[in-house]
Amino acid sequence: MAGAVSALFLLDIKGRVLVWRDYRGDVSAVQAERFFTKLIEKEGDPDSHDPVVYDNGVTYMFIQHNNVFLMTAARQNCNAASILLFLHRLRDVFKHYFEELEEESLRDNFVVVYELLDEMMDFGYPQYTEAKILSEFIKTDAYRMEVTQRPPMAVTNAVSWRSEGIKYKKNEVFLDVVESVNILVNSNGQIIRSDVVGALKMRTYLSGMPECKLGLNDRVLLEAQGRSTKGKAIDLDDIKFHQCVRLARFENDRTISFIPPDGSFDLMTYRLSTQVKPLIWVEAQVERHSRSRIELTVKARSQFKERSTATSVEIELPVPSDATNPNVRTSMGSAAYAPENDALVWKIKSFPGGKEYMLRAEFTLPSITAEESTPEKKAPIRVKFEIPYFTVSGIQVRYLKIIEKSGYQALPWVRYITTAGEYELRLM
Amino acid sequence: MSGHDSKYFSTTKKGEIPELKEELNSQYKDKKKDAVKKVIAAMTVGKDVSSLFTDVVNCMQTENLELKKLVYLYLINYAKSQPDLAILAVNTFVKDSQDPNPLIRALAVRTMGCIRVDKITEYLCDPLQRCLKDDDPYVRKTAAICVAKLYDINAELVEDRGFLDTLKDLISDNNPMVVANAVAALAEIQETSTRPIFEITSHTLSKLLTALNECTEWGQVFILDALSRYKAADAREAENIVERVTPRLQHANCAVVLSAVKMILQQMELITSTDVVRNLCKKMAPPLVTLLSAEPEIQYVALRNINLIVQKRPTILAHEIKVFFCKYNDPIYVKMEKLEIMIKLASDRNIDQVLLEFKEYATEVDVDFVRKAVRAIGRCAIKLERAAERCISVLLELIKIKVNYVVQEAIIVIKDIFRRYPNTYESIIATLCESLDTLDEPEAKASMIWIIGEYAERIDNADELLESFLESFPEEPAMVVLNNATVETDNPDLRDRAYIYWRLLSTDPEAAKDVVLAEKPVISDDSNNLDSSLLDELLSNIATLSSVYHKPPEAFVSRAKSASAKPDDDEPPLPILLPSSTGQGLQISAQLVRRDGQVFYSLLFENNSQMLLDGFMIQFNKNTFGLAAAGPLQVPPLQPGSTARILLPMITFQNISPGAPNTLLQVAVKDNQQPVWYFNDKISLHVFFSEDGRMERANFLETWKSLPDSNEVSKDLPAAVIHGVDAAIEHLAAANVFFVAKRRNADKELLYMSAKGPSGVPFLIELTAAVSVPGVKCAVKTPSPELAPLFFDAMETLLK
């Protein structure tokens, strides 16, 4: 079951090698480059764009970021999930180091890039990907010192994500509960899928090695403790924890206990697949007077309690690519035509609960059309919004206990917000 | 924190190498370091800076860690080409492996393992021995991996020095990272060895499961993957294991989750209690669904795996079909995989909703996706008898949209539905006939003709409709017409007509061939299409490439041996290309060979002169396939009377000679003592035949048809002979010429085969021969007919 990659390549947008690290001496950079440039040339062929491709005994796996491809070449049956995820982590580490990951920043820092590739992967096996700890002993020029460093304890410790000896004057924790609502409504107005993906995003500024314990209104836990759960407890479908959380402990008694990394990270994510009422409902009527004009009548309704208010609402309405001369009226907010996306974007800064707003638009269509009727691109209506101080799931942080041997008091700050994730309503 | 290293790339002046040489030898530290950076920059852009070897190695003894790392990097790249000089570095390596700073100790042992030069490996043993027992876990974890490196270069050495036992001891190390790397190294070594090296006992198992809680996410993957080989003794042990692994399903790292799923599925095989199994299925569903919120590339891997999992345990995701509905912005490769899973999960309960989705997809813009969506409707009709009618009505609605490729695809799937449910849905034929004139793809036409033929008595104007197809006969691909002809019909008039065309076509061997190959496939629900033993093997490989390709690992794994690989002793002698009479005592025999998916130049040097010969180098002139050496030639110094066998890895399309393809390979070899020797070799095309050249029948037919007749060339190979059909097939398969179909015609055997040549050019082959009679007629159809003469040469060599 073992398997390692043979080499790791960083390629430019045309597929040429910028930097590569040979881990096992059994693949050729020339061959990889030739294969990959050909693959990119073939654009438009969907099969060639699978992130895992085979050529002449070698498997290439790649991801793209800006104008850079990160790619591995392997001759063995390696763990594809692990390697692709590793490429994403590598991207994150580069971003941490160079702020922007692009061709230029890789060239500008090729020495550090080589050092990182050497440290993060050995003989084609992923080793270590914690950007914060890596930057304690692999530094860019400006921060480099002549003193020889040692590997931070964290690299091999069970607590591999946090260094010892961190000090803050004021010990604080910020906890953001962010829920994003994904919804797909078909052209009959039926909700065909809806789910909520939540994340507990933490920013910790804590000294030492703090032991944290987080309490949520988790039904399973509360029931196990024999407390009443009337109305307030919630069921979380699938919970995923950052590696700092003790999973075996959670499995045993649902306690979320951990020593957090320093700075920001996602402590946990969860999913809720119970059907929720769409928070913002959009209905669009499209009247197409062929070869002259097209009329859109759009109603947007907020379906949450009046005490909450959605902000930064953006409703993207698809329009035919050959439409011109927009004429738009709205009962609230403003609308802008974005021909580059074939869309009309309706923005409403503040959208309180229980309200309904209208938009009417008219576009001119060309009088001549191509004879071959090719199908129109059928983009859905897409909606973006944020609702602060509100969660769909009703999740609540009951407590966050922080215990450190120096005995300091730390303040947790908790915020809740709901946003639109993949929020799509197909046109009728 | 941006650097400014790009300035090091900018020196491209003529005298660069001497200039760098001078700077490398500078007494100023900064200048030296800058020079090394320039060298590495040059190396990065692919310039050959190997001539600076000595000067760079001289910078190795430094306190500066950054500089040291750069020099090490240089060594990894060039030590192979300067094996003798590489010895210079050994002292520093050995010294560094005892440095007080653990970073440097680890760096030294890590780098030494990457230098794949035999002489260095011997010196690596002592430092490695020490580092495996180092006080610092960082050094131990690096040393653990280094054992696997050494094993890859020289397995014997590892076993002789007892490193395997030390490595096994590391499984009990108190540091989780060391344990994880030791597991990875042992698992890899086990993979290449036939002897049991890494046996997981219940004791190791329990130790590793404990380590699981403490090691990094990557280490958890190593351990879970290694443990999935473990066979529990009984159901109780299996349940215990599962219990300890299930918490991993909550890990944020998708690879950890998938590897945990793999292990649970493996152990579930042993668990007899249906309650426990049901409970586990319930537990695995949410994490599998959550994988679909990951990055698209991971989603792709997850979907390929879920495809396998639902074939084995359909209940796991039976209620989750909605999560596989495509989102507008999903990349096309994700959409395609979601579609496959939707078909697999479609049931009488959810089919209405699924059909609505398919219908939606069938009106999108991406043609391939649309076609697949239409086919999906057909596959659901075949799979779910009770829903067939609804599927057909959706297809009819789609036909009415009159988008050309949707109509054609719909006709094709309707034909399959007709074959699955004969005499049930013929009422819709009239609607189909309306779109007759829009059909321009052979497969759609053939389907339509099949339908008309099959239901001829129910169509008033069947012969009229067929006539319209026959008019265009001369320019039709054979498949359309022949399908027409082979249709069984009760209409005598139609049959006569067909018979005439049949006879007409029988005189055309190519078309007749298509008749033979175009066997009617059995129409059945093919959505659960993997046979159970393959499925079980793939499931034991969850998360790996094997599970992504849906192929067993041996179908694609190619452990290319490094240049130091020794050729087998029982190989046939190589042809002598430079006789010692010409080479002043040096004799060279050589031949291109293919091994593990790679082309090598197999060379035998014999020194029959009176002096020591060394410093061998090789150069290839421009040739048709741009063959060139992938690395330097590594011939040890040759004492008088001694020989050396070398496998030189080759790359293709490096320096291509223009003009018509030919087989000439001009080679130049030089050494330090003699003039340059030139000799000619002949390239045999079959060394390029790749391992993935196998073609399915349908694909073979399609490709054959898509190529114009002018691309077909044939030749009699008088020296070739087939002694037995099966033996010939086996023999050719070993040379990557794959069997597709065969038939007999009088006393001749006809074999249809496929091969894939340089840069993926397919060869479709027909061999005609009488068994054991010399002389084989070889016909080949290929997009590159200019390669045919070379191809015939290769076939004749293979069939001699």
Image (cartoon, helix red, strand yellow):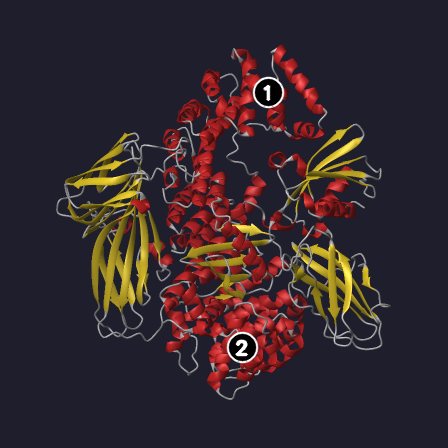
Residue B494 appears anywhere in the view: yes
Which residue is found at the position 51% from the left and 26% from the top? Answer: B439
Q: Looking at the picture, does residue B442 appear above or below residue B243?
A: above
- Are the residues under badges 1 and 2 in a single subunit? yes
Tell me the quarter of the image containing the N terminus of chain B: bottom left
Mark 2 — on which chain does it sit? B
Which numbered disc covers residue B470?
1
Q: How many angstroms separate mark 1 from mark 2 (CA)?
A: 74 Å
Mark number displayed over residue B71: 2
Amino acid type shown at disc 1: Leu
Q: Which residue is the extreme one toward the left?
A: A307
Residue B413 image point, x, y percent: 50, 27
Residue in the foreground of this view, choosing between B14 and B382:
B14
Q: Chain of mark 1?
A: B
- Image location (x, y in percent) of residue B122: 65, 75
Number of residues whose C-alpha sits closer than 10 Å to that of mark 2, classed few (under 14), some (14–19) or many (20 or more) = many
Viewed as shown, does residue B144 lie left or right of B349?
A: right
For numbered disc 1, what is the local secondary structure? helix
Query: Does any portion of residue B69 appear in the rendered image?
Result: no
| As drawn, B241 above or below B157 | above
Q: Is residue A86 left or right of residue A100?
A: right
Instruction: State yes or no: discs 1 and 2 in contact (Cβ < 8 Å).
Output: no
Of the image marks 1 and 2, the number of the one nearer the N terminus:
2
Residue for point 19% across, 45% down: A231
Residue A203 vertical placement versus B251 (above, below): below
The disc labelled 2 sits on which kind of residue? Answer: Val
B673 to A343, vertically: above or below:
below
Location of residue B607 in the rendering, given as x and y in whole percent from the top left corner? 81, 71
Crowding near pointer 1: few (<14 within 10 Å), some, many (20+)?
some
